[in-house]
Image (cartoon, grey):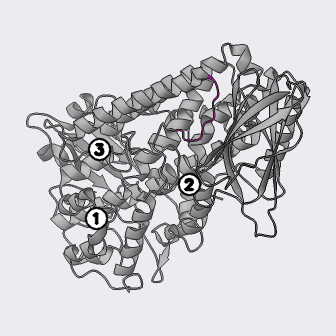
Amino acid sequence: MAEYKLEVTTGDMTNAGTFDHIYVTLIGTGGKSEQTELDNYGMDFKPGMTSNYTVKTSSSLGKLLLVKVEKDPFLCLPEDEWFCSKIVVTTPEGEAILFPCYRWISRGELVELRGGRATKVFEDDHPLLTDHRKNELMLKKTLYQGAELMFKGMLGSTESWGKIEDIKNIFRSTETPMSEYVSEHWKEDDFYGSQFLNGVNPNVIKRCSELPPNFPVTDEMVKPFLAEGTSLQKEMEEGNIFLCDYKVLDGLPTKVYDGESLHVTPGFIMFYLNPENKLMPSAIQLYQQPSEQNPIFLPSDPETDWLLAKMFIKNADLLQHQAVYHFTNSHGLAEVFTVATLRCFPVIHPLYKLLIPHFRYTLQINTAAKKKIFGPEGILSQSSLGLQGNVELAEKAHSKLTYDDLCLPENITARGLESISNFYYRDDGLKLWNIIYSFVKATVEYYYPSENDVRNDTELQDWISEIFTHGFLGNTTSGFPSEFMTVEEVIKFITMIIFTVTGQHAAVNNGQYDYYPWIPNGSFLLRKAPPTTKGQSSMKTLLETLPDVGLTGKFAALSWILSNKYTDTVPMGSYPDEQFDEPAPKQMIKEFQAELSYLSEEITTRNSQLEVPYTYLNPAVVENSITI
């Protein structure tokens, strides 16, 4: 007689338990056990409970391969699904084997759990395991049919704002220290400039060594705003001139509002990094082609002219941020990565175990976003671009996306931003990237000790092929891999994925309620046309340009929703669902967590010295997956 000891853990979320009968069958290389009901005296399978059971067999089953779990109804009660977290089986020989589950099991359902160390497809050494792996992938490819990008009182008021100060009333009860700071400093040029480095869209600004020919800023125009004794050309040569170019917005359809098409300005803004290391906006052209009706606005222009020019640039920046950098390049790509992982990797695959915690809730939040954000009645349909314009913007930008754009070290170098001062997104982001890289490198090299391991893993090759085809549209000029030939290629790609769904999403998402509720600092919609001549505007013009009271409330509510968190948030590097059974990857996770903790302390210490702290890449507040 042989005895197998089972520890069965039920999830700790609400309604995870069950009153139904649970049966298990153990399957090994030497045979299988009888179907055994898991039943102790008293209540079994309560939320958060770990219960112990014994399965007896006439002799040892040999190497334990699978645990078959079945759920039958109890009496005539309504369906109550059971969330099984994991089963740990200790064999008669004393080996404890983890069988991860982490899923809901319905009445009458049969689930076969595979345990032990993670394996690649060519490492399965038993026909039962080979069949189980093949059947699992067939089912998953049926369930997940292809990966596609996600893009294919106050609230009813139409009155204009009477004065700027009244806008505070819409978020006074929920304002953050940062949103309050924004409302007080939004007019200041140095604060405006800092947002292009450390606000919610640090993705557009580039170092400028030569001005575009269609942005004819002259030395005479900007000399009053440069240091004494220098020139525009000299400052460009010294690396102190920076540019944002919004040409991707050119030619897009816009929303029809009150019978007229709204205006979106696909222009330029030039910044000067002054001797005090402040990034100052120094020249703005609102459209691509210069003309008398498209003047270059300067800080010396009348106050409301300059404020309006900055507002239209911020509108363009916000629209690009939301459609491209937030939804397409983080949410949309995360969906592609998630679906490919679910379709191409069985749960025993080491890369499934590594990646799946970083896709928690991604499909759920994207499903909701498609309706609430990008649906016909979604909030972006009420932006200056309207629904069609936002969709075309996302498609246009995605067609130009490159692998380097998503790999932060290459991205920073390509934009010439390696040495600009006070760029905390870069500083924290590169440190986070390197920590992720070290963790991924250790894990991947443990499971793929040679290049042949990579080339022979057909599931891995299928995975990257699906991502290349559906996520990057088979674009061979983009630099994205369509196959893997080396271990290093796998390491870099997985580092990019984990950084995208953790740090990068946090950087472009978590500060939205800090910067966007104060609508003058950045609005989804501007009602009036931008100025075409100087000296004709007033504060009344500015208030009439801002969205009306009702839309202001909706946009502020959206920023609050997008920045909110679930109550069961999982911080970066936390893995409550135990996937790995081997000591080595478990130790790698501990080292990863330690490095994240050190970075968190470093960022917290730095922020304590800053008037405007940069918190969005602190691992303590970065989520392990895209959940909002």
Q: Which amino acid, by three-letter code, is at mark 3?
A: Tyr
Foreground: disc 2 or disc 1? 1
Magenta stretch? 575-582
Does the magenta-highlighted stretch encompass residue 20?
no
Q: Residue at x 60, y 67 (%)?
A: 371
Q: Nearer the viewer, residue 139 or 515?
A: 139
Q: Which residue is mark 2?
A: 394
Mark 2–mark 1 Cα distance, whole angstroms, equals 30 Å
Q: Looking at the picture, does residue 351 appear above or below residue 62?
A: below
Q: Marks 2 and 3: CB-CB under 8 Å?
A: no
The x, y position of residue 627, in whole percent, is: 52, 53
Foreground: disc 2 or disc 3? 3
Q: Secondary structure at mark 3?
A: loop
Within the image, what quadrant is residue 156 found in? bottom left
Q: Looking at the picture, does residue 102 appear above or below residue 316?
A: above
Could you tell me if residue 409 is visible in this image?
no
Q: Residues within 10 Å of mark 3 (few under 14, many from 20)?
A: many
Question: As drawn, is 530 to the left or to the right of 188?
Answer: right
Q: Nearer the viewer, residue 545 or 57?
A: 57
Q: Nearer the viewer, residue 549 or 304?
A: 549
Q: Which residue is mark 3?
A: 614
Q: Which amino acid, by three-letter code, is at mark 2?
A: Ala
Which label sits on residue 175?
Answer: 1
The x, y position of residue 314, in whole percent, is: 34, 58
